[in-house]
Amino acid sequence: MTALSESGLRRLWHGLPWALALLVYFTGGGYLGLGTHALVMILFALSLDLALGQAGIITMGHAAFFGIGAYAAGIFASHLSADPLLGLAAATLAASLFGLLSGAFILHTAGVTLMMLTLAVSALLAEFANQAHGLTGGDDGLQLGRMAPLLGLFGFDLWGKTAYLYALAVLFLWSLAAWRIMRSPFGRSLDGIRQNPRRMRAIGTPVWRRLVVAYGLSAAMAGSAGALEAQTTRSVGLGALSVLTSGTVLVMLVLGGTRRSYGAFLGATVYVVVQDFAAEIDPFRWMFVIGLLLMAVVLIFENGLTGLGDAARRALAGLPRRSGRP
Amino acid sequence: MTQPALAVHGLSKRFGSLVVAQAIELDLARGARTGLIGPNGAGKTTLVNLLTGTLRADAGTIMLDGRPIDALTPEARVRRGIVRTHQINTLLDETTVCDNVAIAVAERDGIAWRLLRFARRWRACIDEARSRLAELGIAHAVERRVSELPYGEQRLLEIAIALALRPRVLLLDEPAAGVPSLEAHAIHAALDRLPGDISVLMIEHDMDLVFRFAREIVVLAQGRVLARGSPAEIAADRQVRAVYLGRSAS
Amino acid sequence: MIDATILLDGLAYGMVLFIISVGLTVTMGLMRVVNLAHGAFAMIGGYVAAMLVGAGVSFFAAAGLATLLVGMIGAVAELAVYRPLYRKGELAQALMTFGLTFVVIASLTSGFGTGIKTLPLPAALGGVVDIGFRTYPAYRLFLVAVGLGLALLLWLLIDRSAYGARLRAAVDNPRMARAVGIDVNLLFTVTFAGGCALAAFGGVIGAALLPLEPFYALRYLVLFLVVVGVGGIGNFKGSFLAAILLGVIDTGGKYLMPQAAAYLFYGAVLALLLLRPNGLMPAKSAT
Amino acid sequence: MKQAWAALCAAGLIFGLVGAASAETVKVGVIATFSGPFARWGEQFQQAIKVYQKQHGTTVDGNTIEVIYRDDGGPDPARAKQLAEELILREKVQFLGGFVFTPNALAVADIVTEAKMPTVIFNAATAVVTRKSPYFVRTSQTIPQVTVPIAQWAARNGIKRVVTAVSDYAPGFDAEAYFVKTFQAAGGEVLESIRIPLATTDFSPFYERVLQEKPDALFIFGPGGPPTVGMINTWASRLKPAGIRLLCTAETQEIDLPKIGPAALGVVSSFHYTETVDNPLNKALWADLTAMFGKNTVPDLASAGAYDGMELIYRAVAKFGPRATGDQAIGLWRGMAFDSPRGPIEIDEKTRDIIENVYLRKVEEREGKLVNINFQTIPMVRDPWKDEHPE
């Protein structure tokens, strides 16, 4: 097989998810709300992939950044401006600042201790949001007014068409950035830190500082996801900050596979779609279906659902077995 | 006399009541080839950790090219030029051999912070990594993952990474430990070809290797410098024979 | 005397935390399996005991039987589900055990509905006893006694017995352990079953404070994880200390400054972990 | 013979087609919590709806009423909104119902308004909810509506000093505010207002504090479900012996009562639904629930809310057929009064909120079962918040 056709095949492969996403736009009808939610969760899972997958920051509190993004977008829309892009930028900045700040305190630690610290930080934040009723609406949640048209041109419609494309565009830009970050010297050094922080210190890497920056970047991405969720559904609830949200996004990412180009895409989409359909059939027992799915994936595949993709790609293209990294 | 590359004065460290380093005096001239030996528990690893900054000394100073580095973090010391290799494997197992070196080059050149506009610089890192690996005779393995590499080549890679950091002082922690004798000659050859301007301190149990490599030997026992001198002087030193060679011979 | 009462309350609450998390210290701490299904095992124990009590079995007998039964379920789960996981890394383990928890929640919802499952305390524990300066709920005194007993038992078993030495050896270096003739597989199965049995025991004994319902498995999971994490992974003495410390800080703080109540528990977790990043009693071979 | 057979078929076909043209399926979307920590709400809703459909049939004038359930998983406004969109746009439902939590109801307000979708709130009890869309009506209660009566009763019945302890979230703040305001206006003294974190499992430190204050009574408001058990049990073991009474609203609710056990004996509460209300509708509801879903099934406020919500929807279909518009349905419902299992109720013509009896009741043991027994009825209470905050 020639190099040209191999790279052509790979390009096709990379275009596929986006083509599918556009297909959903034209055929999705009443599913666009679900689709938008899936896009948001993909972005959220992608942000976790940067922190957890790439840099090895084991976190059980990533919802903190998603929630900050969501609330920041909500508060921005209520008090300052209904412009979605300004709101998105403000939310991204707020989440990233909190990521840098909290990261600076907790990233001296690793492993289970770090996991507990991320958990504690997000739990404290959720309590604060609950108590700061004036700012966040507390348990009643925050309702956003109508968003101004995107770029002054595209109004948000009842059918959620603009919302879907908006989320898709933001996801596309962020995933380009993530793709780039993960392949940069910075991203590679994060991968090194995940594998062996001691080695990285031995080559002079300021491990803590680099992790803090990575955490801030990941928080920015998660904040964008939260802002999208808030803007497209025009509401924010305390659930955005909950431990369950952190757990769910972790499950989505691992389900898809960490450090894979499309792990977050596959994991979040499968989770959201399976949950929605299972809950339609039996709202009480959809957990049974999801639970079995998770167990099956762990037992069958080596690295999440993208393990299936690898096998299929190898079978289709007859490519030699590639190493674990894309 | 020219200024030593590394000078250590009165370096002391204790854990509770256990003294692991006591008023250690040591200096390495530019291009030195010094062996550090001593029985188990003599404080060799502690000394290395004090030099790299992983441990903080209770007293004493460490000077690199005449400037104290006691306040620096381990990472900053690496950037100043104190580089070590590890006894146990601490390579990035899931990464390719080439990237292992290239990541170190990127770190040395300060481009490891780059998120954007890195393609050309990263390419340069890769090129340098490849040529360094070729120099050490493992060009054939550049695209393999470290975990797939034979042990001897992993130790060579360790040395390649250390050299990629352009050290002024290189601390070799048992560079040939555990390597099958068939592969050991490649490591010996690599050690022989270390650039002449680097000052090397080698910690080693293998006496043949130490005596072959070192021009000066420092003997450590119970946290203090017991003796130092040329290999011949050390071999003849009665005290050393008593605490160290004698025991290992028996 | 109010101070003594609050201290006692904190102690009792800490003991509940300990009793209910100690099984997780065994599976996740000692065996290093990310066992998010701990709450599920505790919950199954509680439901089994509730059914037995409903069928007329005495509370204590039901507690014993439920513990035993869940221990056996745990052994089966270890063989079927957990064994393939040991090599797969933390994330795969988290995913698997999370999935298992979901399945258990859905199953219990199917079988028993979504409401609370009652597990009434026996009359002997339901009342109050005179402790000199006031009357105090007997149940809480019982918890303190059980917690202390359990801690002592585990100390003897893990720090002072050949079994404990073998277990630690097997976890640290399974290959070496096999070489010196330890049946590592059997040891792991037995230990995991023990961890599950402890979970079930905690679920039963603690049901009056943490009521049983299908979502129990996730609702309190974080609580269990925190105790193990703050204590220092793999160290049940650390868990014991952490549970008591958190219990006393949380309870005392809520009494003294209820305005800050919401922040106390996780505030304490944050402070303790920043002060002692490796846990209150770090394991010797830190992971 | 063959021809006759064919004719019969044709006739059947034509009849069937004609029938299909006039009789349609009316879809009712119910968004509620069927999984997670609050799943029992969805369960109670669904059971009450099934009982209603058993009693009244699944068709109205030949139109089949089909109920579609969707799980919001708890307080999750984003998900509630997405589900509402799906139900309206894809399933083409004619009515929406359900909504356990206020944030979820608030989140769908805009889309409900835009789609002119008649929507019945079965629970979400924050007073402001019905203001947020002209297509909302509510068949449950508001927190002020059921809280004010207990505060008034306490002040009139020898209780002078009270401590309040509410769960630390928005509904708790409402309950606290209205209890304190009403009780103080009636001459009572509130010694302290404690807020208890939602995640609390051990209530003893808070109650020890209450014990030190030596009030006549403690007023509590909890999030429902498991924490309630601890709230009441800890009162029974620590405060009851000291003669401190317990006042509340929903905490002794029917579904939790058997779980709380004898500790609940003597608790006084005010609420809009009591399982022992003596009317034929309520008896039939209870009897059918136990017949269909087991002897331990108990109706509660969720059952009443869903049951009456179905009544509203059935009446709208009966009046306007399968294609009722939102304005028609809401127009019909405004001012509608009818008998509910809880007693007589009315949908306020102006606010679209519910007007209903509030009962003062006490937990007692009857035939070996713990039940709430009404001892006083305050007839046709309106939501006080709306009277204080006119539009």
Image (spheres, grey):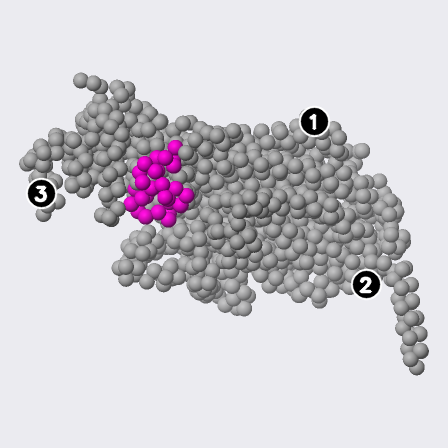
Q: Give x and y (percent) for residue C71.
A: 43, 62
Pointer 1 indicates a residue of which chain? A
Q: CA distance from mark 2 to mark 3?
A: 101 Å
Viewer-side residue, D352 vs C215: C215
Query: Does residue B115 show up?
Result: yes
Tell me the residue at 57%/56% (across/down): A293
Q: Residues within 10 Å of mark 3 (few under 14, many from 20)?
A: few
Q: CA distance from mark 3 to mark 1?
A: 82 Å
- Tag 1 residue: A81
- Give the magenta-colored segment's residue range: B128-155
Viewer-side residue, D129 vs C83: C83
| Same-chain check, marks 3 and 1 | no
Q: Give x and y (percent) for residue C201.
A: 45, 58
Secondary structure that dominates the magenta span? helix
Name the amino acid, label 2.
Answer: Gly
Pointer 3 indicates a residue of which chain? B
Q: Residues within 10 Å of mark 2 (few under 14, many from 20)?
A: few
- Tag 2 residue: D57
Circle count: 3
Q: Is residue A230 magenta?
A: no
Q: Residue furthest front?
A: A2
Q: Is residue B144 magenta?
A: yes
Verify CB contact (< 8 Å) between mark 2 and mark 3: no
Quarter location, residue B37: top left
Q: CA distance from mark 1 to mark 2?
A: 51 Å
- Tag 3 residue: B246
